[in-house]
């Protein structure tokens, strides 16, 4: 199903929560390529619905020092530049434990994960998970009850990326090179997973 409004997304999440056992949390995935607007949509959904937490995948970026050690710094954002095992373990804890669960945040200014910056409180019954590769990693996808893929036209997405990279310190040339280089390579991988989503969002 293609959804054209945040209200339609919220309705599906509410219905899914109602049919989910009270003993565990509902996990909702918001997936899309870089610049698609998934983080904005995820945050808006959290504001719109009651008892909902936000868990961004960005906190599971490998630290800069580790990326350099592995020779992956220039591909930051690619699937192998994340702590996948840590991410999946956190998803499992969030979904099944019923307790408060800590998770890392991410500081875009320094491009570093921040351990323990997020706490999924015990009383929150739904968690919106925002990330690029939720449907690529089968071990992560297995923990999602509902998945939405955010679709947006190419030029809009590239424009957003260039603006974002400039905001965080890249020159216009560097920003465009990164958007059309590493970001675009990752976007192709992510877009190939769109058919695994339950619904597509086009706002």
Image (cartoon, rainbow, N blue to C red):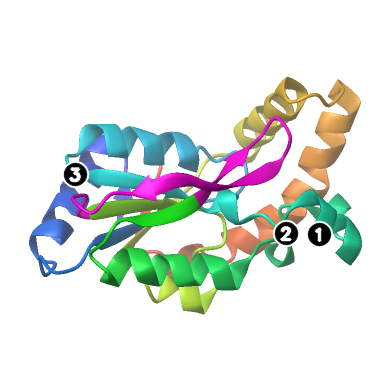
Residue range highlighted in magenta: 104-125
Rendered residue at 12%/56% (across/down): 15
Residue 107 counted in the magenta span = yes
Rendered residue at 23%/62% (across/down): 25
Quadrant for the C terminus in the image: top left
Give the number of the mark in front: 1 or 2: 1
Name the one closer to the observer, 170 or 98. 98
Residue 7 visible from this viewpoint: yes
User: Circle 2: is it few (<14), some (14-19), or many (20+) Cα within 10 Å?
Assistant: many
- Per the image, label 3 sits on a secondary structure element best described as loop
Please name the residue that numbered disc 2 is placed on.
78
Distance (Cα) linking label 1 and label 3: 36 Å
Q: Do the residues under discs 2 and 3 have CB atoms within 8 angstroms?
A: no
Give the percent coordinates (x, y) of residue 35. Answer: 60, 38
Please name the residue that numbered disc 1 is placed on.
66
Residue 199 counted in the magenta span = no
Q: Upstream in the sequence, badge 2 or badge 3? A: 3
Give the percent coordinates (x, y) of residue 184. Answer: 74, 49
């Amino acid at each position: 199903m293609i959804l054209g409004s945040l209200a339609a997304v919220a309705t599906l999440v509410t219905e899914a929560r109602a049919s989910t056992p009270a003993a565990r949390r509902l996990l909702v995935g918001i997936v899309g390529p870089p610049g698609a607007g998934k983080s904005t949509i995820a945050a808006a959904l959290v504001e719109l619905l009651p008892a909902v937490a936000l868990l961004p995948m960005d906190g599971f970026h490998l630290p800069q020092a580790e990326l350099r050690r592995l020779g992956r710094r220039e591909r930051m954002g690619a699937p192998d530049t994340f702590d996948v095992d840590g991410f999946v373990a956190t998803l499992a804890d969030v979904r099944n434990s019923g307790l408060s669960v800590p998770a890392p945040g991410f500081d875009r200014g320094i491009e570093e994960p921040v351990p323990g910056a997020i706490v999924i409180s015990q009383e929150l019954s739904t968690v919106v998970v925002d990330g690029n590769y939720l449907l690529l990693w089968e071990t992560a996808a297995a923990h999602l009850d509902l998945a939405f893929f955010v679709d947006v036209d190419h030029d809009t997405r590239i424009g957003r990326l260039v603006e974002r990279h400039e905001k965080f310190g890249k020159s216009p040339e560097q920003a465009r090179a990164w958007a059309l280089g590493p970001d675009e390579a990752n976007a192709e991988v992510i877009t190939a997973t769109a058919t695994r989503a339950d619904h597509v969002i086009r706002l």
